[in-house]
Structures are given as C-alpha cells and as structure tokens.
Image: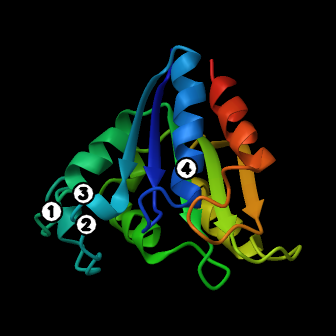
C-alpha cells in the first residue's frame, strides 16, 4: 500500500482535469492505496515572495496560509499526482503557486513517484509539451523522482467533456496500477 496525494489544480470543481483526478483516485483506492485529493483552489495558498525566510527558519515560510499542511502531505506521500488544465501551453497559476512554495523544503523531497494529468481544449501535437516540461521540471528538482505515467487529454474544454472519452478509463487504470 502506498500513500498517494493528488493535487488538482483545476480552477473548476468538476472540471475535466478534476474529473480525471477523481477517476485516478477511484482506481488507486480500489488497489488498496491510501489516497487523498487536494483541490488546490479550495486552499489559501499565497505566492512565494522569494524572501528566503524559510532558509533561516527550518523550512517555515513567513506566509501564514494552508501551504505548510499541503507541503507536509506532499513530503509524506510516496506518490504525487499533479493535475492541471493547459493555460497558454503551460500549467495554470494554481498549480504553479504550489510548485513555487515547495522551495521552503524542496531538499527534503526524495524518491517520489510522479503521475501527470493534463487537459486542453486544443488538440495539436505540441499542445502539452510545455505543460509536461513544467511538471517534469518540478520532479527534476527532487532527488530520486520517477515519472510513472502521463495522461494528456486533448480536445476537452467544457466542464465534463472528458466524461465520455477513453481518458477516464486511462485515469482509472493508471490509479489502479499503483501497488
């Protein structure tokens, strides 16, 4: 059994990337894992100020918000699932804000398994290249990280459009594969 943390960056509750997170969660739970999903927009997460207060205060940030709890859960997890809709070929602001705030304790991240979920209205070959590189960029900063799977759901825009696509099954099966 693994500890799985899903970070859903979708600003739309029940949006396409959020729905894929739910399917991933369902599969990972059925496989016997301890799974939690955090819908980032429901949390109060401030922007990193680049002040490096955290360097001289044992990883504590000067911003008093929900990020210390999120960061602890990220550190405790064996598996991190990062989900974001594609905004201008990149991750959205909600997800980027969480990424930036990991600076307080980034050297403590070791041996994480990563799964990435991306959704986009556009259906071009290059649509998710930069988004995927953003996800991989975070993982590259953490010692011993392993990319385990990617869902690139293209051609879905309106809330729920992903429901009747093979991406839902892919998310479920990917979650189910975690042992």
The earlier-in-sequence mark between 2 and 1 is 2
Can you give x and y, in whole percent of width and height, for residue 112 in the image? Answer: 54, 38
User: Mark 3 — residue?
Assistant: 67
Give the numbered dot on residue 45.
Answer: 2
Task: Tell me the quarter of the image containing the C terminus.
Answer: top right
User: Mark 1 — residue?
Assistant: 65
The earlier-in-sequence mark between 4 and 3 is 4
Mark 3 vs mark 1, CA separation in Å: 6 Å
Can you give x and y, in whole percent of width and height, for residue 49 in the image? Answer: 25, 81
Which residue shows up at 22% across the image and 79% down it? 51
Helix, strand or loop status at disc 1: loop
Helix, strand or loop status at disc 2: loop
Q: Are marks 3 and 1 in contact (CB under 8 Å)?
A: yes
Label 2: few (<14), some (14–19) or many (≥20) C-alpha neighbours in 10 Å: some
Mark 2 vs mark 4, CA separation in Å: 22 Å
Q: Is residue 138 visible?
A: no
Can you give x and y, in whole percent of width and height, for residue 106 in the image? Answer: 40, 54
Q: Are marks 2 and 1 in contact (CB under 8 Å)?
A: yes
Q: 133 or 25: which is nearer to us?
A: 25
In the rendered view, does 29 fall on the left or right side of 120? left
Label 4: few (<14), some (14–19) or many (≥20) C-alpha neighbours in 10 Å: many
Can you give x and y, in whole percent of width and height, for residue 86 in the image? Answer: 62, 73
The earlier-in-sequence mark between 4 and 1 is 4
The earlier-in-sequence mark between 3 and 2 is 2
Label 1: few (<14), some (14–19) or many (≥20) C-alpha neighbours in 10 Å: few
Judged by depth in the image, the label closer to the viewer, 4 or 1, is 4
Which residue shows up at 36% across the image and 63% down it? 103
Mark 4 vs mark 3, CA separation in Å: 23 Å
Mark 4 vs mark 1, CA separation in Å: 26 Å
User: Mark 4 — residue?
Assistant: 19
Judged by depth in the image, the label closer to the viewer, 4 or 3, is 4
């Amino acid at each position: 059994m693994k500890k799985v943390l899903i970070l859903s960056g979708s600003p739309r509750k029940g949006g396409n990337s959020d729905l894929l997170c739910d399917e991933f969660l369902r599969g990972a739970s059925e496989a016997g894992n301890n799974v939690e999903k955090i819908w980032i927009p429901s949390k109060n997460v401030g922007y990193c100020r680049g002040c490096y207060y955290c360097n001289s205060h044992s990883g504590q940030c000067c911003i008093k918000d929900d990020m210390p709890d999120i960061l602890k859960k990220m550190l405790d997890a064996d598996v991190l699932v990062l989900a974001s809709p594609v905004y201008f070929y990149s991750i959205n602001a909600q997800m980027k804000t969480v990424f930036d705030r990991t600076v307080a304790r980034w050297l403590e991240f070791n041996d994480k398994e990563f799964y990435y979920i991306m959704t986009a209205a556009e259906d071009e070959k290059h649509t998710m290249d930069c988004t995927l590189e953003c996800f991989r960029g975070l993982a590259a900063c953490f010692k011993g990280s392993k990319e385990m799977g990617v869902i690139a759901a293209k051609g879905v825009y309106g809330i729920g459009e992903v429901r009747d696509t093979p991406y839902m099954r892919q998310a479920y099966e990917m979650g189910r594969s975690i042992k």
